Amino acid sequence: MEKKKLEREEESLGLTSQITRRDFLNSSLLGSGTSLLHAGCPVDLLAQAGQSASGMNAIAKEDFSGYGGVGDYAESNGNTLAVLQAAHRVRDGVYQQFPVEAEETGELFDLIIVGGGLTGLMTAHEYAKQSAGSQRCLILENHPVFGGEAKQNEFEVDGYRLVGPQGSNDFNPPEEGSNTQLDQFFRECHLPYKFSFQEWDRGLKPLRFASDNYVNIDGFEERSVDVAYYFDQKSGASKPAWMLNIWNDDLKRTPFSERAKTDLLRWRRETGHTGSEDPRYLDSISYKHYLEVVKGYDPEVTKFSQPMVGLLGGVGCDAISARVGHGLVMQHYGAISFPGGNATMGRHLVRGLIPEAISGEYTFEGVMNGRINFAALDRPDQPTRIRLHSTVIRVEHQHRQGDKDLVAVTYEREGKVYRSRARAVVMASGGWITKRIVADLPEEIHTAYREFQYAPALIANVALNNWRFLYNLGAPAVRWMDDGTMFGYCANIRRDMVIGDYRPPLNPDKPTLLTFYMGLYAPGHTAFEQGVLGRMRLLSTSYVEYERTIRRQMTEMFAGTGFDAKRDIAGIVLNRWGHARLTQPPGFYYGVDGRPSPREVVAKGFGRIVIAHSELNGAQNYGGAFQHGKRAAEEILAMK
Ligand SMILES: Cc1cc2nc3c(=O)[nH]c(=O)nc-3n(C[C@H](O)[C@H](O)[C@H](O)COP(=O)(O)OP(=O)(O)OC[C@H]3O[C@@H](n4cnc5c(N)ncnc54)[C@H](O)[C@@H]3O)c2cc1C
């Protein structure tokens, strides 16, 4: 686009004005503005930054991470540039020489946990609980805040605090007294079993909201949510049009062909009901093969389900097993989310481990509305410590004279390299990095890890001053037919929880968050290639490019119902997750050619190192994180 035209467009989209309104006072980064507009792409800047001794480049950080919101998580939205740079140094073999020059901390812990996500935090919780706090434990986490993929974004717009998820989003509340692990966690970590949600003004037209950001994204939850669907010329419409709740009248208004309509309806009826189909058989074929060959559906069914599969499974229908694909597009009944998604779980775990870690009482309200006291996380006199900004670069058993078996853990923190030791280590960091940093990993586990492939995801929280344009549409959730060129395929406004002083409004003329969940898949390639291509796209697109795309797309879709990007957008935070999804290609669950499933091989661990991460259950979720966190703690405590 010629320069003048581009400038005019940027002006009208609000790209040249400061995205941070007067309420974003305590942010150090601006969410937009001319400083970002003409910066190079992050990959170039990453490369430059990688050559500098400090490893940091201020412009690159701004261009990559962009505006991070306010509050505890303002410097930790998604994978941060500093974390990526450190991880890429590991990947590129910078630390392969041993011994790595490191400053000895002289610390000896009973347990070091690598990774402060939900798995690592649950490991620490169970370890402290089952040893009655008698053991010394250190969690090393590479991001500026604990929680892993379960973190939150915070905004302040017109005096309202708005909290949204960065990644890990919904959960199914446990039944009180059921004694499941989730029930125990709720009881032990002071979470309630009943929740209050925003009230919808009865004077306004009725709207049905989701209580999370997922219920609407499978595209067929019109039973409980109003979803508006956007069809443009690319998706077969004669002119762009919105259609509300398309399944209610059996797709009659949609531009799909008659055959596609029939097959989409069949698919919707049959999805999740695999009947007598052998899960092992489903594990051995792709979902696309299942849809188009086994079921004989029109390819439009594959196309329709692709964005959901791409988001939840990381790859297109052609590279995911039918067993997984089926499950992903099933309806999500009864799931809800905390304001910041499962960040709340991590906060409660940390508050229990380190009482001063979060200001306020150990109640739902206290943990939600308190602030993280970063100085309290790593004090020498407490049984559990959390050391942030610390990328572990090497883990290895050592057999020093006079020592019982110990594990040496070397990590990089703010440009310096340190080494601490522990009697045992839990790797709660994820296979993509575990296989590179555990120096004495047995060949069998190395080989199994080759079958763990990952894909990225991108979550954008768009803070709005008002959302009348959606109210005019008649839906708080929207879906469009992504053909691979659009930003995401769905977005929604939740009916949020209200917790003590956290009382965001639910009114079309008041601020809210519109949350976009998107995968970056590339059909036509292997699962591995799709992951790599997706990550390249994710990492080579600057903040401002994404911002422009979001503003353009929202203008294209919503201008007709009153949206004005410059007026209505108060802030955009992007959360880039490089290894969001384990892609689970055919064979992942039950193995192939008589070989055991790779996840069983990895879960065995070795020596004094236990491997635990939610991915060992396949698709990552809080359930897998908790299960493997507990298993890891028990295995460590059982070690002699
Ligand atoms: C976009 C998205 C949406 C999701 N939605 C849901 C949902 O709705 N419900 C649900 O249950 N789950 C969801 N999940 C899955 C989520 O991964 C799990 O819920 C859970 O948070 C995983 O916890 P974990 O500890 O196993 O892994 P992670 O969250 O990945 O934690 C691992 C931690 O280890 C750190 N680490 C890695 N390498 C190193 C190193 N070398 N040194 C130090 N630290 C290191 C990582 O940075 C990270 O903080 C979602 C995930 C994403 C990305």
Image (tube, rainbow, N blue to C red):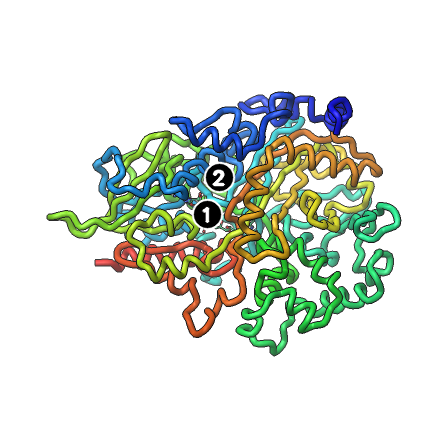
Taking the view exactly as shown, the residue that stands out farthest to the right is 238
- Identify the residue shown where x is 65% and y is 42%: 515
Q: Quadrant of the C terminus?
A: bottom left
Q: Quadrant of the N terminus?
A: top right
Closest to the observer: 539 or 135? Answer: 539
Q: Can residue 69 be seen from the camera position used here?
A: no
- Identify the residue shown where x is 39% and y is 36%: 388
Element type at marker 1? Answer: loop
- Type of residue at label 2? Val
Report how far apart the C-alphas of labels 2 and 1 lie in the structure: 9 Å
Q: Which residue is mark 2?
A: 367
- Identify the residue shown where x is 44% and y is 28%: 56
Q: Quadrant of residue 204?
A: top right
Mark 2 touching mark 1, by CB under 8 A?
A: yes
- Type of residue at label 1? His
Closest to the observer: 394 or 225? Answer: 394
> On the picture, is 617 further left or further right than 241?
left
Q: Is residue 623 above or below residue 539?
A: below
Closest to the observer: 637 or 535? Answer: 535
- Please rate how many residues cluster around mark 1, counting C-alpha atoms within 10 Å: few if below 14, some from 14 to 19, many from 20: some
> On the picture, is 410 further left or further right than 539?
left
Q: Which residue is mark 1?
A: 190
Q: Position of residue 619 (x, y in %)?
A: 52, 58
